[in-house]
Amino acid sequence: MNTLSDIAGRAGEFAARIGEGARNHLPGKALDWVETGAALGAMRTGTRVATRFVRRNPVVAVAAVAGAGLLWYAARQRARKAADAEPIEGAARRVEAKRTAGTHRRSGKRAASAD
């Protein structure tokens, strides 16, 4: 094994040990800040790449946005139809019809012949 690869291997082990030690000894908030910083860096890089792509291919970008809009609209319509098809949740109680003593129901024919 040559000396250069030995140094690279040891440097990798050392970096791993330091990262592991820092992860175990840093408070939770510090790790959140590190993760947030990494997320911001990734977002910044992604924004830069997306901007370059849109500048070079505006037709493709417009088509992608239109396609995404159509997919969103279709999903919204499907969800609305599914919501209309579902039964309304609630409690129901059967109520029996009762006739009172003073009221009689007459049909139209009987009422005309009785007069």
Image: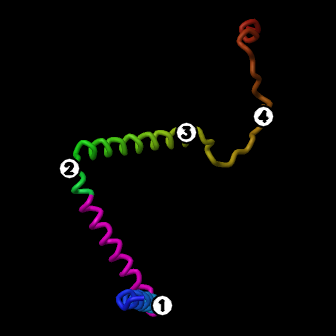
> Which mark identifies residue 91?
none
Determine whether 25 is above or below 36 in the image: below
Per the model, the C-alpha gap separating discs 2 and 1 is 45 Å
Q: Are marks 2 and 1 in contact (CB under 8 Å)?
A: no
Residue drawn 36% across the image and 76% down it: 36
In this rendering, the label closer to the viewer, 1 or 3: 1
Q: Which residue is mark 1?
A: 24
Q: Which residue is mark 4?
A: 98
Residue 19 can be seen in this image: no
- What is the secondary structure assignment of the residue under circle 3? helix
Residue drawn 38% across the image and 77% down it: 35
Q: Amino acid at mark 3?
A: Asp
Which circle's residue, 3 or 4, is located before the other in the chain?
3
Q: Which residue is mark 3?
A: 84
Determine whether 52 is above or below 3 in the image: above
Residue segment shown in magenta: 25-49
Residue drawn 32% across the image and 45% down it: 64
Question: Toward the viewer: 84 or 71?
Answer: 71
Which circle's residue, 4 or 2, is located before the other in the chain?
2
Residue 9 lies in what quarter of the image?
bottom left
Question: Toward the viewer: 71 or 8?
Answer: 8
Q: Amino acid at mark 4?
A: Lys
> Which mark identifies residue 56?
2
Q: As drawn, which residue projects farthest toward the right?
A: 101
In this rendering, the label closer to the viewer, 1 or 4: 1
Binning the other alpha carbons within 10 Å of mark 2 as few (below 14), some (14 to 19) or many (20 upward) gives few
Binning the other alpha carbons within 10 Å of mark 4 as few (below 14), some (14 to 19) or many (20 upward) gives few
